[in-house]
Amino acid sequence: MHLLEDEEKAGKGKEMTPQNLNKSIMRSMPDATAEYIDSNNKRWIVSIEFKTKRGRTDFHALSISSTSPDAPLTRRLLQELPLDLLFREVIAKETELALDRNWEHVSAEKHQGRAHSDDELTHVAEIYVAAYNNHQPVQGAVADAMGISTSTAAQRILVARQRGFIPEEINKKEK
C-alpha cells in the first residue's frame, strides 16, 4: 500500500528513486511472519505488525497470503487461523519491550510528590471540559490524552478542580 502511495506521488512530479522505494518497503515490513497449514492442507504466509499504546501490544496490521494460486481466502480460514498461537512468542517479546519502554517513560515523567504546574493543570482542565461537553468519560479522556492511568487522571482532575482550573459548575456532584 505504501508503495502505491509513493507511485502516486511519483506520478505527480516526484521521481521514484531507489531511496523512495527502500523507504516504502521498510515502512511496510512486518514485525513477524509465520507459516500456517489449514485444515485443507493449504499453506499460508501470515505476517503481522504490532502497535503498542500505554504498555499494551495489539495487532495493527495483518497480511495473509496463500502459497498456491488456487487457494482463496475464505471466512472458514479466518475463523480457524490461530493468531495468538502463531505469534505467542513474538507478542510476549513485544509486550516485554513495550513495558520496558513504558517504565522508562513513566519513571522519567513521575511527579513523585512534586506540585503540578499551572500549564499542566490548564491542559487537564481543557481536556476535561472538552470531554464533558462531548458527553465522554472525563477521566478516561484525560488519561488517554496524557498517557497516564485513570487513577492518576482522577488525581490530577481533583487537583485542577481544587485549584480552580475546572469551574465548579461543570460536572458537579450532588452532596
Image (cartoon, grey):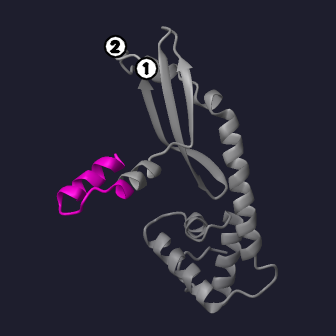
Label 2 residue SS: loop
* Residue 164 appears in the picture as rendered: no
Residue range corresponding to the magenta coloring: 1-20
Q: Position of residue 37 (x, y in %)?
A: 54, 16
Q: Does the magenta stretch include residue 19?
A: yes
Quadrant for the N terminus, please: top left
| Count of numbered circles on the image | 2
Q: In this rendering, is residue 75 above or below 138?
A: above
Q: In this rendering, is residue 81 above or below 24?
A: above
Q: Where is residue 60 in the image (x, y as percent from the top left)?
A: 50, 46
- Look at 52% across and 10% down and name the residue there: 39
Q: In this rendering, is residue 63 above or below 140?
A: above
Q: In this view, does 36 lie to the left or right of 28?
A: right
Q: Where is residue 7 in the image (x, y as percent from the top left)?
A: 25, 51
Q: Is residue 68 magenta?
A: no
Q: Is residue 38 left or right of residue 121?
A: left
Q: Please state which amino acid type lies under the numbered disc 1.
A: Thr
Looking at the rendered structure, which numbered label has been put on residue 110?
Answer: none
Q: What residue is disc 2 on?
A: 70
Q: Residues within 10 Å of mark 1 (few under 14, many from 20)?
A: few
Q: What residue is disc 1 on?
A: 67
- Look at 81% across and 79% down and name the residue there: 112
